[in-house]
Image (tube, grey):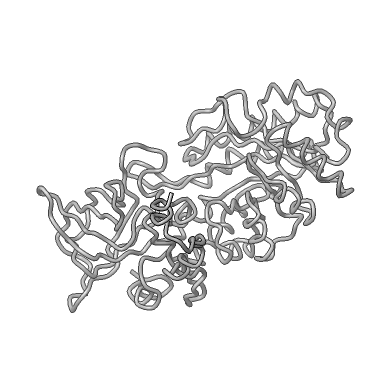
Amino acid sequence: MRIQGIEYEDLAGRFGTPLYVYDGEVLTDTVTELRSALHPALEVFYSLKSNPNISVFRVLRRGGARAEVSSLVELRTALAAGAKPEDVIFLGPGKSAEELGACLDVGVYAVVVESFDELDHLERLAGDRGVRQRVLLRINPACAISGSRLTMGGKPRQFGIDEKAVLDAGDLPSRYRHADVAGIHVYMGTRILDAEVLGKNTAYALDLAERVVRSTGIRLDAVDIGGGMGVAYFDGESDLDLADVVKELNPRIEKFATAHPGTRLILESGRFLSARAGTYVLGVRYVKESLGESFAVADGGTHHHMAAVGIGSFVKRNFPAVLLGRDGEERTRTGPISPQNVTGPLCTPNDTLLKQAQLPDLRPGDLIGVARSGAYGPTASPGLFLSHGYPAEVLVTEGRAHLVRSRDEPDDLMRKQHLYDQPSTPDHALEETQ
């Protein structure tokens, strides 16, 4: 019930609830362990989309992670946290001219283009600036390898260029003077909990890279093998064993790196690096019974943690959760366990964070922690639903708690709205004179 010696109740009293709390030690240990286990030729790039908090990334960057970004703000975040442009890649299917221009002006290591139309657009923008920008082609694989919770290949997708279209494209270097096509990106699936699937995905990507070089004549400065390493959330799931990951990936990376010593090899990781470091802390406001079921209505809900409703599943499953603190004189966090529904403040029945979760009987003032919530929390949630805004975020590192994102206050949300200029004569008066 503590994080680096600090009571969660103390954090709730200081920063209020709901809030996200991130453990800096877990972030550091995770990225250090992953980088130490993987082949040294394989660089770890943190996917900021999983948690774009600038302080979270700073901790991971200090642990050796590079940056994979997908928006102008994520790019600025990575640079402000200390990332070097040569350690940043920018991807996403719908980049704006402003975002592409920022990449060119900053000099990121690579822009990952996802269509030939985008490649042509980047060529024009780079030409206008008189610069040459390294490009990786994101390829939509012709097949899907089963075993990921969300498959990203083998079907019509907005992501990437179809494998056949790339292989049939012919001599690419001769067609582009300013867009320097010099590598590929392949992302075949996400939330993978099977090391063998990671191995098969990697083998496919590396083989595809060599086929693309033969068919198009591009250089191979870099191969991004994607990633998709998952964490266990639900009953029946188990975390990846890094020893198994090493067994599947490292021999393949060793063979490819030996054959292509000048090629940069990239592994993207978001959820795996950040998920286990985060806890969503919410306070119980009311308790009630309805038709024989117990409900605890809390101050936080799915508008802050949409991922907790099931992550791509229509069947509600619970993230791991625990009672962090009790209100009043009785401080014990144990007691009779019974099925509890934990809901939020939204006017929708879908605002259910925990359904029939086995917890001690809850009462107003209790604190609940939803664990493994460091990835796809606020960043993937409708924070403005009912105009509640986003919660505070706190990073605990070296035994100290730091506010790393301020809570949205009502004045903050009202300030961004603009009331249109109302005519001096009321509308109904105009209607009466006509």
On screen, residue 340 versus residue 106, left or right, reads left
Please say whether residue 372 is visible from this viewpoint. no
Residue shown at 36%/52% (left/top)? 302
Q: Residue furthest front?
A: 433
Residue shown at 66%/26% (left/top)? 162
Residue 241 percent across, percent down from the top left: 48, 46
Please say whether residue 427 is visible from this viewpoint. yes
Q: From the viewer's side, name the closer residue of 394 and 304.
A: 304
Q: Which image quadrant is residue 289 in?
A: bottom left
Residue 226 percent across, percent down from the top left: 62, 40
In this rendering, is residue 335 above or below 143?
Answer: below
Q: Residue furthest left?
A: 292
Q: Which image quadrant is residue 326 in?
A: bottom left
Image label count: 0
Residue 336 percent across, percent down from the top left: 14, 60
Q: From the viewer's side, name the closer residue of 158 and 315.
A: 158
Residue shown at 64%/65% (left/top)? 62
Residue shown at 62%/23% (left/top)? 142
Residue 182 percent across, percent down from the top left: 80, 38
Q: Quadrant of the N terminus?
A: bottom left
